[in-house]
Amino acid sequence: MAVAVRTENLWKTYGSGGPRQVDAVRDVTIEIERGKITAIGGPSGSGKTTLLSLVGLLTRPTKGKVLYGDQDFSALSEVFRTRARRQRIGFIFQAQYLIPQLTSVENVALPMLCLDVPRSEAEKLAAERLSGLGMSHRLDFRVAELSGGEQQRVSIARSLMNSPEILIADEPSASIDEKSAEELRSVLRKMVEKDRLTVIVASHDSQVLKWADRQLNMRDGRIVD
């Protein structure tokens, strides 16, 4: 099995040593297979989002390791962790963080503009990403004019702008209807099959859990399957 990312004895503790100490992630050791969809299920508050944040290098663990290849990124400086995120990882959040007044292309291109990529180049790539997701007829539509499913496709296109190895999705179908959610699952499956993209998704949606290649379950910060 080719491994995209793995964790070793991973912990995340908030309020350490105080009366409100919370162990959000407890001693998690997992391997995520490259080119597959791994779903993390569990009730609200079980640690799913925190685990995604740790694997995605958005949060530093209290102890333990997050390894890409043989390199432990949990021990690196924020400069190197930020660089790794930009080069390796794409994110789809439950809250899409799109700007309603901007067009689809402008929303997708925005992260590249923040990296000083010329506007024409960024918007050309954004149009390609959107067209690949069946949004060629909505390039110049403002996000506020799009359906929930279309907005989620804009969010996916934005997450693909850095051609990531790993796509991390936190409850991606929570705010859209079932038809849009089904379309979302189909789009992601095609990307996995075509590009060997690795997808890690946290969800309490039974359809998402069945759709994944592998399901992990969390409870009280631990993997319990």
Image (cartoon, helix red, strand yellow):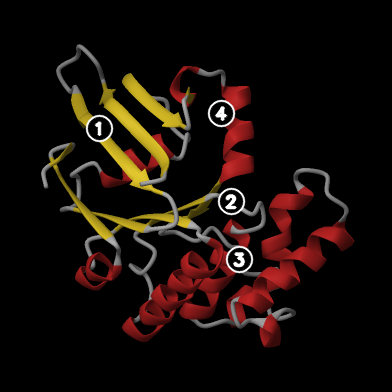
Q: Mark 2 falls on what kind of element?
A: loop
* Labels 3 & 4 near each other (Cβ < 8 A): no
Earlier-in-chain disc, 3 versus 4: 4
Q: Residue at x 49, y 73 (%)?
A: 190
Q: CA distance from mark 3 to mark 1?
A: 31 Å
Spot occupied by residue 13 in the image (x, y as percentages of width and height): 26, 23
Side of 172 relative to 160 (left or right): left
Q: Is residue 104 among what the camera can see?
A: yes
Q: Residue at x 50, y 60 (%)?
A: 196
Q: Which residue is mark 2?
A: 164
What type is the residue that disc 3 sits on?
Ala
Side of 216 relative to 197 (left or right): left
* Labels 4 & 1 near each other (Cβ < 8 A): no
Q: Give the vertical position of 90 relative to 134 (above or below).
A: above
Spot occupied by residue 105 in the image (x, y as percentages of width and height): 72, 70
Q: Which residue is mark 3?
A: 157
Q: Give the vertical position of 14 relative to 128 (above or below).
A: above
* Labels 2 & 4 near each other (Cβ < 8 A): no
Q: Nearer the viewer, mark 2 or mark 4?
A: 2
Q: Residue at x 73, y 71 (%)?
A: 128
Q: Nearer the viewer, mark 4 or mark 1?
A: 1
Crowding around mark 3 (Cα neighbors within 10 Å: few <14, some 14 to 19, many 20+) is many
* Labels 2 & 1 near each other (Cβ < 8 A): no
Q: Nearer the viewer, mark 3 or mark 1?
A: 1
From the viewer's side, name the closer residue of 20 and 162.
Answer: 162
Earlier-in-chain disc, 3 versus 2: 3
Earlier-in-chain disc, 3 versus 1: 1
Earlier-in-chain disc, 2 versus 4: 4
Crowding around mark 1 (Cα neighbors within 10 Å: few <14, some 14 to 19, many 20+) is some
What type is the residue that disc 2 sits on?
Pro
What type is the residue that disc 4 sits on?
Arg
Q: Which mark is residue 29?
A: 1
